[in-house]
Amino acid sequence: MTRFRQVLAVPGMAPLLGISLLARTAITVDAMALTMYVVIALDLSYAAAGAVVAALTAGVALGGPLLGRMIDRRGLRTVLLATVVSQLVFWLTVPVLPYVILLCASFAAGLLMVPIQSVTRQAIAAMTTAEQRRAAFALESVAGELSYMVGPAVVVLCAAKVSPGVVAWGVGAAIVVGGAGIALLNPPLRAGDEAGGEAAGRPRRREWLGARMVAVLTMGFGVAMLLSGVDLAIVATLQEAGQVSWAAVVIAVFGVTSVVGGLVYGALTRPMPTWLLLGLLGLVTIPVGLAHDWPWLCVAVIGAGLLTAPTLSTVSDAVSRLTPAAVRGEATGLQASAASAGFALGAPVVGVAIDASVPAGGFVAAGLAGLLTALTGYLLSRRSPAPSPSSSSQALKPCDAVAPTP
């Protein structure tokens, strides 16, 4: 645990991760809060709720790179101020908006979502040394898993006690407080030596968005698609067994093992390639469908859980290493967009596989998505030229993301 102590000892790192955890927990459940409001308060169908969530997700996917580019050009606090104000207005008015206006407003809110994840990742890259960075991104992935474990439970509990409108206010308040907290903290987004290089100007997109970066973004898309599909497959499997009430327990086991895997991986002295971690994650996901009741499903998801946070952390690490400091905001925004697209596509694809076969087919489809994107990332990296010594991506060693070019 020495590596983690060193990371947390970095000035500003502990508050950054703490505030990020609060805001990410709220952002994790914003779709659930909107769904509950549309279904319960407005008394509309789940399809109507799905349209609102889809609008929000589309906005997030499109807004990520745009907000990142604005951070690169205008600075952190300017963007945070604009997004915090927009979120404050949106969540305050949710309980009084008619459905059609809510649908349009959700897209705008997604477009101007507080960029907590991308800002946290930029700050980690700026605040840590190359030796500390992998452990720091492992902690960031663990925080993401904790938000996933805690957020839904808190929202469901609050929904049972108060109205969906109040739940929406609470989610919005947490997002606003998190964004304002990051603005007050104002973490550095450039290391000292990187800040001095900004005079050279902003590099052209084709200089950094090459095959290696596309490979990493593809794998980020793949792991998000896999995780989204696994959640749906767990619910479908237990529903068929008449044990759907145990889904929360299985998902909790998955989350806890992911936290353990992230901590273990961050403490290792040598990293693993992203394509290898994602490929292994896909392989161990496929046979999970052999379990047909909740106790065995808890056991079956352990392997996938142990590999989840390490895979997510290597994607973030690789993006930070492949990106020049002057465009790191746009790059992390693209990473967030790739993940959003993966989460949005994973459930429908796996749902089709489940409908066409059996619930176990959902795990097969999710695992194959991971394997396919891992293979795609590996092949893309093999076709790309090795970075030159003067390249901004020289810090990316072959084991950080993809295999070396022979």
Image (cartoon, rainbow, N blue to C red):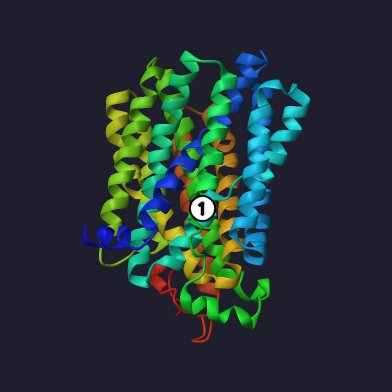
Give coordinates of residue 340: x percent, y percent.
58, 46
Location of the N terminus by quadrant is bottom left
Give coordinates of residue 333: x percent, y percent.
60, 56
Q: Residue at x 48, y 55 (%)?
A: 185
Closest to the observer, 202 or 319? 202
Closest to the observer, 135 or 291? 135
In this rendering, position of residue 86 left or right of residue 187 = right
Q: Residues within 10 Å of mark 1 (few under 14, many from 20)?
A: few
In this rendering, position of residue 255 left or right of residue 229 = left
Location of the C terminus by quadrant is bottom left
**What residue is shown with label 1?**
184
In this rendering, position of residue 47 left or right of residue 5 = right
Please say if 257 is above or below 152.
Answer: below
Question: Quarter-wise, where is residue 206 in the image?
Answer: bottom right
Closest to the observer, 81 or 65? 81
Q: Residue furthest front?
A: 184
Please say if 318 is above or below 94.
Answer: below
Three-letter amino acid code of the residue under disc 1: Leu
Question: Quarter-wise, where is residue 137 in the image?
Answer: bottom left
Q: Residue at x 47, y 14 (%)?
A: 160
Give coordinates of residue 348: x percent, y percent.
59, 35
Give coordinates of residue 122: x percent, y percent.
50, 62
The answer to whether residue 287 is visible is: yes
